[in-house]
Structures are given as structure tokens and as C-alpha cells.
Image (cartoon, rainbow, N blue to C red):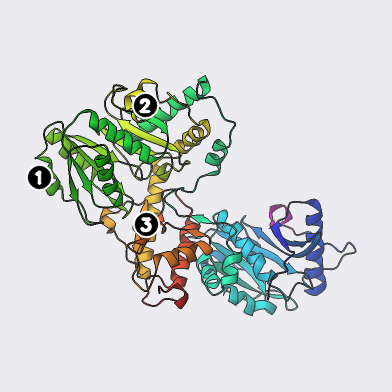
Amino acid sequence: MNAQPSLELKLADQDWEFEAIHRLNYQTFVEEIPQHDRNPDGRLVDRFHAENRYVIALEGRRLAGMLALRSRRPFSLDAKIPQLDQHLPPGRRPVEVRLLAVAPGYRQTRLFAALFEFAARACREAGHDLAVISGTTRQLKLYAHLGFVPFGPLVGTAAAPYQPMYLTLENYGLTLGRSPARRRAATGSTFNLLPGPVCTTPEVDAALAAPPLSHRGPTFLALMADVRRRLGELTGARHVQVMPGSASLATAVVAAQLALRPATGLVLANGEFGERLAAEARRARLRFDTLKLPWGEALDLRQVDRLAARLPRGGWIWCVHHETSTGMLNPLPELAALATRRGLRLCADCVSSLGVVPLDLAGVHLATGTSGKGLAAYPGLALVFHDYDPVPAPEQIAGYLDLGHWASHASVPHTHSSNLLNALAVALRAATPARMARIRDHAAVLRADLRALGCSLVTPDALACPGILTLALELPLSSAAIGAELEQRGILLNFRSPHLLARNWLQVSLLGDPPPAALGALRAALHALGVGRPAVAPALQTA
């Protein structure tokens, strides 16, 4: 059965739509199901009408079906089922679904399921992960097909009995897994679990959309000063420059600074981004050695110290703090202490740790960050932190790569986007210890859940950054196929990066502090797809 092609599903917001709701409400729950008394008006206004959000299906100006969502407690079921919460899974954010009605002529279509699919998207966007409903006993089979679990005694009357039921996000994900058509219909909204661009808040979105400002005006200059001050407070760094560009620009700026004082250095690489540092150092024609380890292998500080002992005082060490390819958190404080003891300058790529874990850059020579990733603003601003006063070097470095040039103009020697800076300013207000703790706690729960599913995580828990979880899949599972299937379910993961495809890895990012509903949807979808189990549906097998 297919939904009518001309139907529009939406949240009701017009007076005539509400009037049609009252009349379908009367037709269904007075004339067909004798739940309420008849009245001469032929309309039934729900007692919670002012608090309801109505999902409706329209064919032109004709109401084909509806349901109501209400999140305010007490629910109507609270009055019918004593101690309702004892019947529900703990730790959830429930919403009550009521007034489900489909007009005659639309009852042999997919409209019933389509209403739930639209409602599920609205609920998960609002942070709900559990729905409760009093379902008519006439449709128990259909409710079971959608994943509803019955509980408690029947409610209502002998003439109109109803079965209390609940539906978890996980169960709903399993029912989607049984139907490609329903998967496609349910992807009107998405959960962003990418490492970039990350999910942003409505406040950050609004800041980006503000009217642009001149980068020479006093309002912009004050905004830039405030952003730099906040970044310093967040990291303990003495100075920071904000530049239009990606994190790759910030890396090139660091390499250009190291080239000004020729000295032998050491690059530490235990993943894709450590190896990228080595590549950038080669492009800048720096003199250096590389400690190249297998991806996901922890740095041995004794080995690092032996290599550092070979460097002249004034040399440098360059490392990645959070190795995004594997999710490993390298020991930055210990490396900083080692560098200080050896008289070396420590440089660090903090692109994926900034805003996710507590970060102390006091004494770090140079460090890089970005406006996206863990700060959860929009990509497009490169950040370079430094603990010294760089001198412009116009004879040696191109202006855009010259940190001294940026510092001498308080980060505004060239055109800037006030929209990107404004979004970053708003995002920085939310970069709090509470947010970092929330990401940490969610990551711990998700890691445990994934291990319970049988998933293999690249980085052990003790060495992992909470911002990234990298799953290593085993054939016949394909990270490309699983990632594409998750996209069809509205769950965006990182799997298209060449270094992940080459290793059959799949990556979950919490850098943007995604809502718990996103993690619940991911767990349900992975379970439905058999990730972590030895068998997999043929459609997801590799050739």
C-alpha cells in the first residue's frame, strides 16, 4: 500500500486546518468510535488543543489524516494508568501521541505509517525518544508492526477500548530496517554525526544569518577582540590569531613559522593527521625526523624522549593532540613537559580537541584550531595560538601565511566574514565545562553500547577522545555500504574519507554535541543492520 502521491504532510498552523481537525476529531471519536457524546455542531475540540502539535496530511484543502503530539505532563494516560512511569523504560524523554485519525477513503494507503514517520522526525528533532499512546484495539496488529509495545490494562470504555502502548526510538529504527520504502520516507530530517560540518545550535545559525558587517568597522573589531579573548580563556594560550580559511591554512602557518628559525624537529605520527603534519613539514622544507607508528598505536613517551634527546635545544616537536582518524587522544601535557625539559618548542594540532576536552596551551609554542569541529560553529576560520610575539617576515613568507603579519593587525589585515565570526562568538559561549562533560558522558555510554553490539573500536577506552569513535568493520561488512545505508535512514557518519575507506572504518563524531536521540537512532540502526554480528544482509555485503 502506498501513500497518496498528492498528499502533503505538515504541522498544522492555519485556522482552516484546525477547523478541519475538530471536524475529523468529531467524525472519528463521536460518530465512529463512541468515545464522546454527539453535539449539534459536528465538531470536537480536544481538551488539550492549546498544547497539542498536530501532524496532518492534506490533499489540497481536504484533511486526510491527523495525529496530535503533546509533551506536557501529566499525560492523559497519567490519569488512566497509576504510576505510569513504572511501565515505561527509564531515562527517556516521552511524548504522548493522541487523536490518530484517518478519513475514509485514505485507510487502505500508507497514510497511517506516513503520519508516524513524519511525527517521529518531529519528535526526535525535539529531543524525544519515547512515544506513549492509547491505541484502538481494532488496530493492534498494525501498531505491533510499527514497533509499539503494549503495557498495563485496557483503558477507555467497553464500547471504545484502548490499549496503552509505548514506542522507543530503537524499536522504530528496527521497523524502518524492514522496509526500504519507509526508510526513504523517513529521511526528511537527519542526525549529523559527522566530524565536519558538525551540528550547530539555532543560536549559532541565527548569528550566521545576521546582516554582514564591515571588517573595518568598530563593531567588527570589538567582536574580533572578544572572540580572541574568549579563545584565550578557553585554552590558556597567550595569543591567538583568527584567519579566514580552514584548519589546513593554520597548519601551513605553523610550518612557515618553524621555517623562520632553521632547527631540526620531530614529527609524531600515529594516524592520518600526524602523517599530514609530516607532509606539510616536507612542503615547508623543514629539517626533521618522523616517529611513524601504526595507526591507533599509543605514543611511547620513553621512545619520544630518546628521539627528542637527539634534537638541538631550540628544536621542535610537532604532534596531533586528538588524532581524528582513530579517535586517539595523545598525551599533550606530558609532551609539553618533555619538550620543556629538553629545551624544545612544542607545536600541536588541536583542531579536533578544542572545545571537546579541557585544553591547556600555556607554554605550547604553536597550536592550531578551527571554528568548526569541537567549537560547533561553521567551518571557515583558522585559529593559530602562540606563546610568543611573532615578527612579520615580508621577505620570507607570503602575507597570508605570515603569523606576524596577522598579529601586527590584531587578526584583521585582510577581509573577514563577520557572519562566520559572529557564529563563532555565539558558539564560544556554549563551549563550557558542562558541554565537555556531556560529550564525555554520552561517548562513554555509546562506546559501551557499541561494544555490547559486538562492534570493534579502533582506540581503547583509556586512550580515546570522547569526540570521535572509529569503528573497524570486518568483511563481509562494508563501511561504504553501511555508511550509505545509514544516510538513507537520516544518520550521517564519516565513511567517505579515503583513509577510512581504505581500512573499512566507519566514524561517529560527537564533536557537535549531538542530542541523545541521535545516538539512540544510531544504536538502533546499527543493530538492525547487523553491525557487530557475524552475519549481514546480502544487500550490504561486499562483492
Q: Which residue is mark 1?
A: 306
Whether residue 531 is visible here, answered yes or no, is: yes
Q: Is residue 415 left or right of residue 382?
A: right
> Residue 399 shows which numbered tag?
2
Q: Nearer the viewer, residue 166 or 60?
A: 60
Q: Position of residue 451 (x, y in %)?
A: 34, 66
- Image quadrant where residue 237 sits: top left
Residue shown at the point (14%, 46%) measured from the top left: 304
Q: Position of residue 33 (x, y in %)?
A: 77, 74
Q: Is residue 291 left or right of residue 69?
A: left
Segment tinted magenta in the rendering: 46-55
- Image quadrant where residue 159 sits: bottom right
Distance (Cα) linking label 1 and label 3: 33 Å
Q: Residues within 10 Å of mark 1 (few under 14, many from 20)?
A: few
Tag nearer the camera, 1 or 2: 2
Q: Which residue is mark 3?
A: 498
Residue shown at the point (34%, 57%) measured from the top left: 499
In what quadrant of the picture does the N terminus appear? bottom right
Q: Is residue 162 left or right of residue 171?
A: right
Q: Amino acid at mark 2?
A: Gly
Q: Secondary structure at mark 2?
A: helix
In the displayed structure, 468 sits above or below 30; it is above
Distance (Cα) linking label 2 and label 3: 32 Å
Q: Earlier in the sequence, mark 1 or mark 2?
A: 1
Q: Earlier in the sequence, mark 1 or mark 3?
A: 1
Residue 51 included in the magenta stretch of the image: yes
Whether residue 83 is visible here, answered yes or no, is: no
Q: Amino acid at mark 1?
A: Arg
> Residue 199 shows which numbered tag?
none
Q: Position of residue 351 (x, y in %)?
A: 35, 42
